[in-house]
Image (cartoon, grey):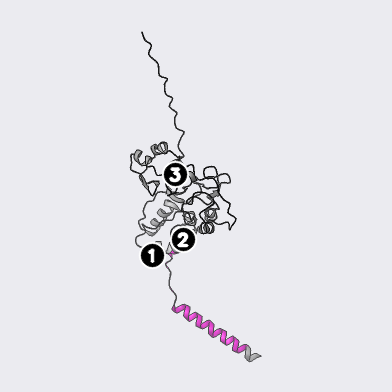
Amino acid sequence: MISTILVVGGLGALLALLLFLVAKKFYVEEDPRIDEVEKILPGANCGGCGFAGCRAMSEALVSRDDISALYCPVGGGDCMKRIAEYLGKAVAEKEPMVAVVRCAGSCDNRPRTNQYNGAQSCLIASSLYAGNTGCSFGCIGLGDCTLKCEFDALHMNPVTGLPEVDEEKCTACGACVKACPKMIIELRKKAPKGRKIYVSCVSKAKGAVARKACKVACIGCGKCAKVCPFDAITVENNLAYIDFTKCKMCRKCVLECPTGAIVEYGFPPRKVVESEPQQTAKAE
């Protein structure tokens, strides 16, 4: 009995010594700045920066001489400036972004033609069939994007059946963009007062087909591109797109769009100009 205890105890001590020697040999000294940078980062671990988490982002920020390509969407510009000051490196200025749902195919605008009874997942549904409406490009409406959002910034509207973005909570981490199998969610520049102008449609179907499936579909007529004074609108594959880096928000395209596919948010109400009644000249 005693001999067994001694053997087991000696074996345990030997293994412990071996583990100590291995750990000593392969020990890698870590830069203490990594811990400090990780403390500055928000700790969301959302992957919006392109890394697996804040720890990996911290390691990249410390190890790289040029960190101009690195950016934390959750912490934003202030967070990156603090990190740059601590590390003594230069960081690029980036404008804040926000997620935008480019589909206006609500239940009223895009009538349902069938009922889906499978797994409640956009990814699964999109792999099985085109969708429950005549438009195979629009939102499926099962809420994969809302489940992936870690900041409670996306919710499904029970009336329209579409996801809605809370700009105050959105960090532009891009999780919802990756989660959408139809690619209708896009990160666009966050303008002052929440103002936005964009084509709320991703359908590439021809005009008549797109309009039959959805009342507010883009038909690729090109009228918006012709009226834009800033060359911010292109039409390709029967679909118009507004480049937010060129758009000056003059809103001419909104008035020109015949289907209402171009939407505007955050602007004051337009002034209604009443035309003066024409006076008929009396014959003398």
Q: Residue at 36% of width from left, 42% of height from top? A: 225
Q: Residues within 10 Å of mark 1 (few under 14, many from 20)?
A: few
Q: Is residue 11 above or below residue 182?
A: below
- Residue 71: x percent and y percent? 41, 56
- Residue 116: x percent and y percent? 58, 54
The secondary element bearing badge 3 is classed as helix
Please tell me the numbered disc located at residue 38. Answer: 2
Region of the chain picked out in magenta, as a range: 5-34
Q: Which residue is mark 1?
A: 63
- Residue 115: x percent and y percent? 58, 52
* Lower position in the chain sequence, tag 2 or tag 3: 2
Q: Residues within 10 Å of mark 2 (few under 14, many from 20)?
A: some
Is residue 57 visible to the viewer in this orientation of the structure? yes
Give the residue at the far top of this rendering: 284
Q: Which residue is mark 3?
A: 208
Q: Amino acid at mark 2?
A: Glu
CA gap between label 2 and label 3 equals 54 Å
* Lower position in the chain sequence, tag 2 or tag 1: 2
The secondary element bearing badge 1 is classed as helix
